[in-house]
Image: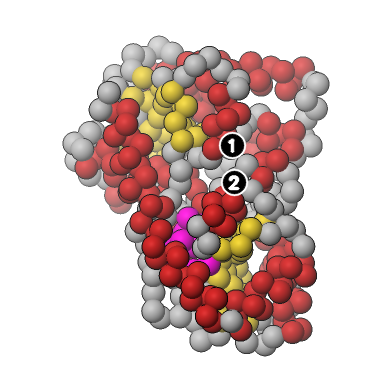
Amino acid sequence: MIFSQNFHPSSFADSVRAKSIVEYLNSNGHHVTLFTQTIESKAFESPLLKIHLLKWANPTNNNSIIKRLLNEFNLGIELFCKIVFLKKKDYYIFTSPPFFSCVIGILAKIFKTGDLIFDVRDLYPDVFIYQKLISSRSLGFKLLKLIERFIYNRSKIILVATEGLQREILNRVRVKKVILYKNGYSEYFKVSKIKEDKFTVVFHGSLSRFQNVELMIDVVKEINLINKNINFIVIGSGPKDSLVKDLNVDNLRFLGRLSNEDTATIVNKCHIGLSLRDDSQISIDAFPVKLYEYIGSGIPSIITPCSEGGKEIERLNIGYNLNNNLDIIVKTILMLESDRKSYNAIKQQILLNRELFGRKYITKKVFDSFLSD
């Protein structure tokens, strides 16, 4: 059984992650029951994949924090009721966030035999501290930490998306199988010879609180004044998307949220991938999914701040890990547009390392390691 709030053809991070797991399990003859809120996913049912739609209001980053938590709680209650009446499964996989929905769903798993696999993409409840929604000294936060520890200790296996998450969780719980399961790019992201007419910088993904959308807008405006041969494309949605929608410059196209396949079709035609985040510890420990997807498309990345993902990009010489500094980011983009020798050298490095970052490769390597035990 798998719970993933979003699933294919959605472009959210949990969707593409869950799709890889389902494809791996089905390819090895395993029957999968999936609980999701993505209505379109029903079209992808098969003899090995049964999809149950959860109908409660979808908690999103666009909601106020109170509304989001309420929706997560109600979604969790619906999931709990579904799992209670579910036939026995060998594995119960929950991917978080949504954290509270997972917590309530996992409570139903207590009454079931089978192993719990908890997939951690963000560190909750710590995220609430970074968003200044709760004090680390409050009773509420201490209660949430107890719940977090309860889930970790109940899990047979904990999957984590980054090395930073792995270190944090290993510091918090008894010796467990805390396995690094990186994201990777899907089969839609391909190296394409067909490119945008102008040199194009792309950002895609959630325009959320941890994204430095304000800096990205400053970059777009500064480049617009300096070089008319460089364009920007922004794909995504979130609490900060109005900042991009309201920007009136002729070198920017804002496309909103697209499917994973449509997003890839556009990213494949661009020249540079952008990932600008804030300076929080969460961003420093991050390896954003979009970086894998830029690698899949064969284009150099520019990432801020100095982070786990950025260090790997720099180590392989396939992009630039920078501070949140407007001048440095602008100079780097201008250099890549004008110095095609340096640009092509980076692209060659990407081609040499690209296969190691594919979702299918990563998923097979990770799941083979414990399903064969």
Q: Quadrant of residue 190?
A: bottom left
Q: Which residue is depicted at the point 51% across and 86% down?
A: 197
Position in image of residue 42 (x %, y %): 33, 47
- Asked where in the image residue 333 lies, by quadrant, the reply is bottom right
Label 2 sits on a secondary structure element that is helix
Q: Nearer the viewer, residue 241 or 117?
A: 117
Q: CA distance from mark 1 to mark 2?
A: 7 Å
Estimate how packed mark 2 is, as few (under 14), some (14 to 19) or many (20 or more) residues with alpha carbons within 10 Å.
some
**Kind of residue indicated by mark 2:** Glu
Query: From where the camera sits, is residue 84 visible?
Result: yes
Q: Percent x, y for residue 275? A: 61, 59
Q: Which residue is mark 2?
A: 308
Residue type, mark 1 in image = Gly
Picture layout, residue 248 above or below residue 349 = below
Residue 31 placed where, x, y %? 23, 33
Which corner quadrant holds the N terminus? Answer: top left
Q: Which mark is residue 28?
A: none
The residue that mark 1 highlights is 164
Q: Are marks 1 and 2 in contact (CB under 8 Å)?
A: yes
Q: Nearer the viewer, residue 180 or 217?
A: 180
Q: Secondary structure at mark 1?
A: helix
Determine whether, in the image, residue 127 is placed left or right of residue 151.
right
Which region shows up in magenta? 290-300
User: Of residues 276 and 22, which is closer to you in this image?
Assistant: 276
